[in-house]
Image (cartoon, rainbow, N blue to C red):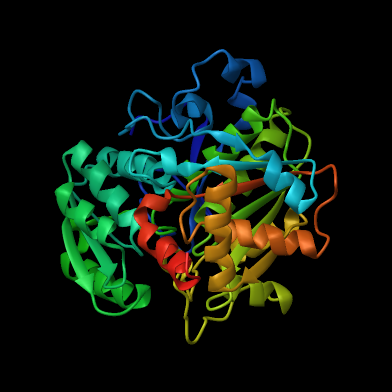
Amino acid sequence: METTPAFEGLECVDCGESFEAEAATHRCPECGGILDPTYDFDAIDVDAETFESRRFDSMWRYEELLPFSRESAVSMGEGGTALVECPGLADELGVGELYIKDEGRNPTGTFKDRGQTVAVTAAVQHGASDVALASAGNAGQSAAAYAGRAGLDAHVFLPSRAGFTNKAMVNVHGGEMNVVQGRIGDAGAAYEDAMDEHGDDWYSVKTFVTPYRHEGKKTMLYETVEQLDWETPDHVVYPTGGGVGLVGMHKAATELRELGITEDLPAMYAAQAEGCAPVVRALQEGRDVHEPWDAPDTICGGIEIPDPGASPLILDALRESDGGAVATSDDEILEAGTAVASRAGVEMGATCAAAASGAWELADRGAFGEDDTVVLLNTGTANKDADVLRSHLMSKGI
């Protein structure tokens, strides 16, 4: 494999065993745990000026902190997204500064591209011909796009409730779309059956099955800190389903601190919908792992993940960063999405607006200080589910 000099390999977060990246492709060969890329930080000679000297054009500008080089990446220029200052919203929340990290500006319109660029690069380096995953929607569209660019076949399993745009674009990108009646759990079961059938012929790019999806998403935090002139934000509010980006961003914050580029960790907050909030409930009950949500019921399909497999990592990130978790109703989430669009101009996806409604709730609880800097993650463009936001306005007679 063509890897960066400091990339050491993969370490199991459960049993602690380490593996060469060439040998271990997905879960831990010893215990089945999640594998996490590791680095020799003594071998990384970078500082803030290193990155400032480069064009702000792609997440691959941080290649020293990634497993693969920019040259070897299956890339479409993902990352390098805007951090939009929203002073009016900051006043409403009673904080010093509020920013929205607008991931809707990625190639397929969501932050999923950051994960798939690394995961599909790994697939290519491992000699895969086919990639597969189950997805609520956006990750499947992204996987099909990156597989197409790499000349691979993509097999995507989506629940029937996935948005039309996601379904259409999986096909447009040349992927094989498998629509499964039901919700994400049903799509996941169909994917597992197919993986059992196809064995080693299909290479999984499913979240936390491949070690590389969360590794790509950590670059959202690198960019945010650089865009704030290397000042760590006080709080980051993240719309949380599987929690891949939250885990990745927390990892990035610890890496920047270890490299001496920053001193602090941002307080990470998981924002969920009241109809499916296993992380919120686990944190409230003091658990180290969630209990599956029995009857998920939210219009926010992107974060309707009743059984997030990496909840221990999510909960660790929330606690280590002195953050928290918050759940708001569907109506509050959609109201927040339309409020952000009408008052700040940012087209925040319906699901992503959980970050905004969660931030309002956290502000009401007194979680933020009047001089604090708060960053909301808009993980995808509103164009993916504009009909949901418009329907909310219509229900109010607008």
Q: Residue furthest top?
A: 53
Q: Quadrant of residue 388?
A: bottom left
Does residue 14 appear in this view? no
The x, y position of residue 63, in whole percent, is 48, 27
Residue at horizontal 65 percent and vertical 72 percent from the top: 280
The x, y position of residue 328, in whole percent, is 62, 71
Q: Is 366 placed left or right of 21 in the picture? A: right
47 is higher (above) or lower (below) than 197: above
* Front-most of residues 300 and 177: 300
Q: Is 262 placed left or right of 250 in the picture? A: right
234 is higher (above) or lower (below) than 185: above
* Front-most of residues 256 and 246: 246
184 is higher (above) or lower (below) than 384: below
Q: Is 57 placed left or right of 250 in the picture? A: left
Q: Residue furthest bottom?
A: 294
Residue at horizontal 28 percent and vertical 57 percent from the top: 166
Q: Quadrant of residue 16?
A: bottom right
* Front-most of residues 253 and 86: 86
The number of numbered badges drawn on the structure is 0
Residue at horizontal 60 percent and vertical 39 percent from the top: 221
The x, y position of residue 108, in whole percent, is 33, 44
Q: Quadrant of the N terminus?
A: top left
The x, y position of residue 386, in whole percent, is 38, 57
Q: Is 285 placed left or right of 118 in the picture? A: right
Does residue 10 appear in this view? yes
